[in-house]
Amino acid sequence: MSALPAELWLRLGLFLGLLLALGLAESVWARRTRQVRRRQRWPVNFAIVVIDSLILRLLPAVSAVGAAAWAAQHDWGLLALWPVPGGIAIALSLLALDAAIYLQHRLMHKLPLLWRLHRMHHSDVEIDVSTALRFHPLEILLSMLYKMALVVLLGAPVVAVLSFEILLNGTAMFNHANLRLPPRLDHALRWLLVTPDMHRVHHSWHPRETNSNFGFNLPWWDRLFGTYRAQPRAGHTGMAIGLSGHTDPREVAWLDGMLRMPF
């Protein structure tokens, strides 16, 4: 338990540093012209992440890193049954957790009850670094419980789980950023990392595009399972962002309406 404060400060420092860097980068190298000002969207998106964080901190037993520490203490998980060298265990854990998050994301779109929670994320009328923080508290809680179960099943090392949580948060902010990358760099990065142009397709109004490019970190799962779509049909500057049928500002831009959206 003594490691938790250090973990918290590490993650908070990295989060704030990357948020500031990407926010500044968006101002200089914007991919799309903003139709809605940041001051109209950012306060509610940041309010959501504060609520999400408080809920997880008020439930100290709900922690993927804590689950990894518990599994290690009790020798639980596949990696405890079939030990492998530490570096391989970390690599396998990172790969398995990333694949599991891809699967979770697909289920969020496929199952009606889960989609009711996840659609709050897609209802943002713009997409930028703050959209990466816009998840309903119930979705965040379910996602954490899901990750905890996977961590215990795997017996993933604590360092792997902490690294994955930092990577997941950082890559989500990067690929939601309203950021223009040089075409050659974007093309090359897509083989290693989900880029902003790749993930932006996922936030299109068109259902076929919304149900594509589910990856947050590694792009391989979309290519492997046939959910990869290279570009939006209307182009990145012309595509409509958000959800058709969910345009009422009271629902998509007010905190109380957003929290009630699943119900």
Image: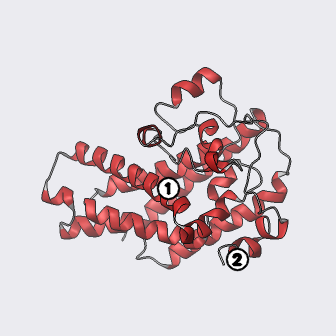
Left or right side of 251 for 113: left
Of callouts 1 and 2, which one flags the residue occurring earlier in the amino acid sequence? 1
Instruction: Identify which residue, 132 or 3, lies in the foreground.
Output: 132
Q: What residue is rendered at 43% in x and 73% in y?
A: 62
Q: What residue is rendered at 64% in x and 68% in y?
A: 50
The disc labelled 1 sits on which kind of residue? Arg
Q: Position of residue 87 (x, y in %)?
A: 25, 43
Residue under numbered circle 2 = 260
Q: Is 223 above or below relative to 69?
A: above
Q: Position of residue 136 (x, y in %)?
A: 62, 68
User: Disc number at residue 179?
Assistant: none
Label 2 element class: helix
| Res 87 seen here | yes
Can you name the residue that lies furthest to the left here? 82
Q: Give the alpha-carbon distance from disc 1 to disc 2, as whole Å.
A: 23 Å
| Res 3 seen here | no
Left or right side of 107 for 238: right
The disc labelled 2 sits on which kind of residue? Arg
Labelled pair 1, 2 in contact (Cβ < 8 Å):
no
Total residue callouts: 2
Q: Quadrant of residue 230?
A: top right
Q: What residue is rendered at 71% in x and 48% in y?
A: 127
Residue under numbered circle 1 = 106
Q: How is the image coloured?
A: secondary structure
Q: Quadrant of the C terminus?
A: bottom right
Q: Quadrant of residue 243?
A: bottom right
Q: What residue is rendered at 40% in x and 63% in y?
A: 147
